[in-house]
Image (tube, grey):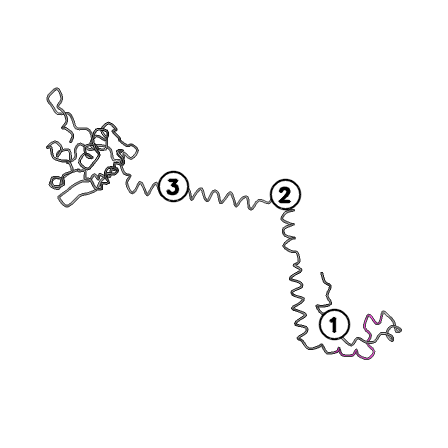
């Protein structure tokens, strides 16, 4: 355990150092010489923590040290009021978590700050509000970056490149090409339907004195030689007589 502070040459004890600040998350403390001399366990870890700038010499633990009592003795700390340090979690010899709190009574304490010693290096744990603010700020940064990237991509999509007009027209023409297999399949379906249907009845005779336009152009000689059709020419030329591609 550390010895009490020495006395000045004028006979008065030295002035107590000022209490550390609230936000000291940007620094860390490590004393390699001390780590080479003493084991880092639950019995000596507080003496090592007292060497760091995170330690508040006005705490109740310091009063116990001056009285040669172990500074983490809970039987004495619960009888005192004020600022104190307690060892909350221990994973020897790698991790030690020390919590700074304010004690108002034996049962009422208010947590203030948390420190952790990781492999001999002492850090102050950030407050929960600072962690949330940092995470939210990082998320907003990436969301804004994503929107900026998406906006740039949309601008490129909306830009019309004249060099790509020919490629686009060729792809469009390729999509509009006729599928010959599909045409044959439709012809087969229509032919099967036609075979199932009854034959078409003969068309009614033309009225007396009526001449179709084609017969009128041929003249009276052609009218006498060409008999009237007995089957509808449109129905007669079904799918089987279409032009095959």
SS class, disc 2: helix
User: Label 2, on which residue?
Assistant: 163
Provide residue 174's location: percent of width, then percent of height: 64, 53
In this view, the mark in front (2 or 1): 1
Residue occupying image coordinates x 71% and y 68%: 240
Magenta stretch: give its range. Answer: 202-216
Q: Quadrant of the N terminus?
A: top left
In the drawing, what numbered circle is on residue 144? Answer: none
The disc at residue 138 is 3
Per the rendering, the mark at residue 236 is 1
Determine the residue located farthest toward the top in the rendered image. Answer: 9
Real-space Cα separation, disc 2 to disc 1, in angstroms: 51 Å
Our reading of the magenta stretch's main secondary structure is loop
Task: Please tell me how crowded label 1 is: few (under 14), some (14-19), or many (20+) other residues with Cα within 10 Å.
Answer: few
For disc 3, the neighbor class at 10 Å (few under 14, some 14 to 19, many from 20) is: few
Q: Is residue 8 above or below residue 218?
A: above
């Amino acid at each position: 355990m550390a010895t009490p502070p020495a006395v000045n040459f004028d006979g008065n004890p030295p002035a107590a150092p000022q209490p550390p600040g609230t936000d000291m998350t940007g620094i860390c403390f490590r004393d390699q010489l001390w780590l080479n001399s003493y084991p880092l366990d639950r019995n000596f870890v507080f003496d090592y923590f007292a060497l760091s700038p995170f330690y508040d010499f006005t705490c109740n633990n310091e009063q116990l040290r001056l009285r040669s009592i172990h500074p983490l003795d809970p039987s004495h700390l619960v009888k005192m009021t004020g600022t104190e340090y307690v060892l909350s979690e221990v994973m020897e010899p790698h991790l030690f978590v020390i919590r700074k709190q304010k004690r108002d009574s034996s049962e009422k304490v208010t947590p203030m700050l948390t420190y952790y010693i990781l492999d001999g290096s002492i850090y102050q744990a950030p407050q929960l509000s600072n962690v949330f603010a940092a995470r939210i700020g990082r998320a907003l940064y990436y969301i804004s970056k994503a929107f900026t990237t998406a906006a740039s991509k949309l601008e490129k999509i909306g830009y019309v490149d004249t060099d790509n007009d020919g490629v686009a027209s060729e792809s469009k023409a390729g999509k509009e090409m006729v599928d010959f297999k599909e045409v044959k399949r439709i012809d087969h379906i229509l032919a099967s339907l036609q075979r199932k249907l009854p034959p078409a009845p003969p068309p009614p005779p033309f009225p007396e004195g009526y001449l179709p336009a084609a017969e009128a152009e041929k003249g009276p000689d052609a009218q006498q030689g060409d008999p009237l059709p007995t089957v509808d020419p449109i129905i007669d030329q079904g799918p089987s007589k279409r032009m095959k591609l």
